[in-house]
Every structure is written in C-alpha cells, then in structure tokens.
Image (tube, grey):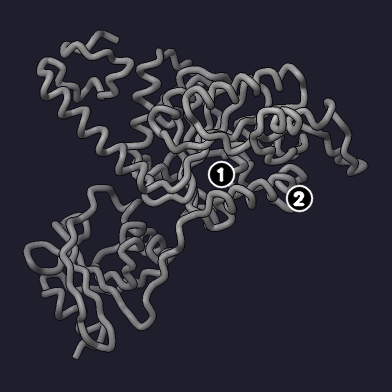
Amino acid sequence: MEKCPSGADPATCGVDPKSCQGCDPQAHAEEKQKEEITLTRALKQIRHKILVMSGKGGVGKSSVAVSLALSLARRGYKVGLMDVDLHGPNVLRMLGLKQPFDLVHAQFHLPPDLFDNLKVISIEVLMRDREMAVIWRGPLKHQMIRQFITEVQWGGLDYLVIDAPPGTGDEPMSVGQTIPDAQAVIVTTPQEISLADVRKSINFCRKINLSILGIVENMSGYFCPHCSKELPLFRKGGGEKTAQAAKVPFLGSLPFDPQVVEAADQGQLMDLKESDSPFFQALAPIVEYIAEVLPPDAKKERAPGVMKFAVPMDGGKMAAKIADAQYFAIFTVKDGTITDQQIMPRPAHGFGGFPEWLDDLQVTHLIAADLSDKAQELLKRKDIQVLPGEPQKPPEVLVAKYAGVK
C-alpha cells in the first residue's frame, strides 16, 4: 500500500483509502476522527467481546468459536460471530451458510430459534470464489477488521465471538488494538507441543494488555460411538496445569466428538442437537460460566398497561411505504391518553435492522401499509403488532382509532 500523501503510515493510519483525504492533512485528521467516533459507537452497543484464539493450528479453535456462539444464541442471548481468520475462513462452511439474506446486518437464512439471536460475518461473503486465497498484508487486515465492526449493523449484542487465526500475528493484534476490552479464550490440546504455543499466546495477551477469560482444553478424550466410553487420545490435564502455572482460569475440557466433525464438514452444525453430542454437553458448563462472569444486558421490560405506536411519516402525514418515510412519529398511550409524542429520524439501515430498532424503542404497535408477509413475520418475532394504516392521514387520527384515545 502506498504511503498516505499526508505522511501517515497506512499500518497505523486506519482510514479507509477510498475515503482518505491524504492530500490535505487536516481533512485526513478529520476523516480519521469520524471513523474513530463510528467505531466507538458500534463497540458501545456490544456488551462483551470474546476473542477465541490458539497458539497453533489444528486444535479445533474454529469449532469451539462457532459452537460457543451457537450455544449462547440458543440460550436466548444476542450473539454476533465474526470470522477474522482471513486466510482460512471456515465459519460459514461449518454452519452451511451460503447466500446472505442481509449482508449489511450480517443476517443469513437461519432456523427460527436462531434468527433473532445470531448474526454472522466472514471474509467469505465478499469472495466470488471461496477457493481464492486472500493475499493481504497487515494494514489491509487491520482495516477489514475495523470495517467488520463499523459497517455491519450489529445492533445491540450481548456477546461478539471473534474467531481469530492461529498464532499471534496481525489479526489478533488488530483485534486487541481495535477492541481494547476484548477478552481471550485460548484453545489448546493436551499435547506438550500445543501447550508450549499456548504459553506464547498467554504472553502475547499480557504484552498487549488483552484480558484472558480462560483456557479450554479441546480433544481431551474420544467418546466411542459404539461402547460410549471415553478413550484418551493424548494425555489429559495439560491445559489445566498450564492454566494453573500461568494463573489464568481453566474453563474446561472438551472431548473429540465425531458427530461435531462430521456436522461441521457437511455444513450442518446448526442441526446437531446439543443433547446428543458429548462435545456440546461438555461445553454447556463453560457457556454457563461465561454467562455468569460476563452477564448480558438486562432485558428491557415494557411498562405494563402502556402502548407505544410507531407511524412512518412523509410530509406530516402517514407515508404510503416505510421506504418513503422521512421520519417516524412515536406515540405513547396509557389509559386512553397520549402521554408522549416523539419524532425520530428514519434509521439509515434497511429493513433487516428495523424490527430491532423498534424493539429498542419499546414499540408495541406499528401502523403501516403495504408490508410484506416476511416483514410482518420479523416484527411478530419482536412481539410488535402490525396494524393497517391509511396513507396521507394524520398520525394522531390513526393512533386514536386503534388506541381508543379519548
């Protein structure tokens, strides 16, 4: 990458070259400041960031990262899964995700129990050929990670699980620099050669001030599908001893489960029942521990007896389509009386993040016209009732009609 005309080093600059105003140092500084503000706002919406890393490859790091995200999402938490293993992305293949339903919101076609709770992004969604090698140097990797955070509309997340490549290279370094409050989960196997690399990962985290959530020992045993006995693949306990010596938490041991391997290879990991898998059963206490030490945001409870109506507006009257709305009128109704009225700008993102936006505002009813069945289904999942509206009518008239305003 060429050096920025302002004299800034692209490895530390962080400004997207497409928007860089390097010919003008002041404009360059302003652009960088804007990006930092955007990054800070995006990170504030994510309560906990978990970086899953390993000292070496082949320890099942990606399997742990994906399974951890799935398990948290199935427990009702809002989870983002971000694959920053740019040279060997496997997350989408493990989950069988091919065509994004909404790329801006990291939303794929997911089963109903995961649709509202899991968002996934990977470099693979931007690749025309999934077999193509990504040949990038550090600055481009750093910028891509920042764009994953700022340009994807994650919304409010309880957890962002980040799958990093093995080792202590550019990607984990960029995550540590970009997300200073991230916490690392280090995956290892009981082999000494793997444990030696784990010690390097621990030292890496401490040098860049990255908090360590704990160590997970993967492939600690093999559950035979025929006799249902656990057979040791390697000697056990190495991960726990390493954690004790380094004075970091030991989160637990996970067995080698052929069902998980087969399901991941076939892109069917979401279809595997946790109750049928020794791997997921062993993962459950780890998930519970993480949810305990990193508690999610308290759920917003709607006030009893209060209705909140949203009406898309265009020129002071109800808009014919949500896409035509310039802003939304939000009415709070209690005991047949409008107690509050607000004007909110229409969110910049598409419909994929719209139900989330209304839910954050604690809207109970949306008065709108010409909504597709798919859109109504997404709103229903948020317990938001859709009411038919009449375009060009004043919003107060429409609210009074449905709320029985006196």
Residue 276 marker: 2
Res 125 quadrant in image: top left
SS of the residue under disc 1: helix
Where is residue 89 shown, x and y percent of the image?
Answer: 52, 26
Question: What type is the residue that disc 1 sits on?
Answer: Ala
Res 302 quadrant in image: bottom left
**For the point 59% across and 53% down, which residue is it?**
292
SS of the residue under disc 2: helix
Residue 293 marker: none
Q: Nearer the viewer, residue 203 or 28?
A: 203
Is residue 144 at all visible to an observer of this figure? yes
Where is residue 324 shown, x and y percent of the image?
Answer: 16, 56
Q: In this figure, which residue is indicated by the disc labeled 1?
A: 69
Q: Residue furthest bottom?
A: 406
Mark 2 surroundings: few (<14), some (14-19) or many (≥20) residues within 10 A = few
Question: What type is the residue that disc 2 sits on?
Answer: Asp
**For the point 51% across and 49% down, which residue is it?**
110
Vertical placement of residue 78 versus 14, above or below: below
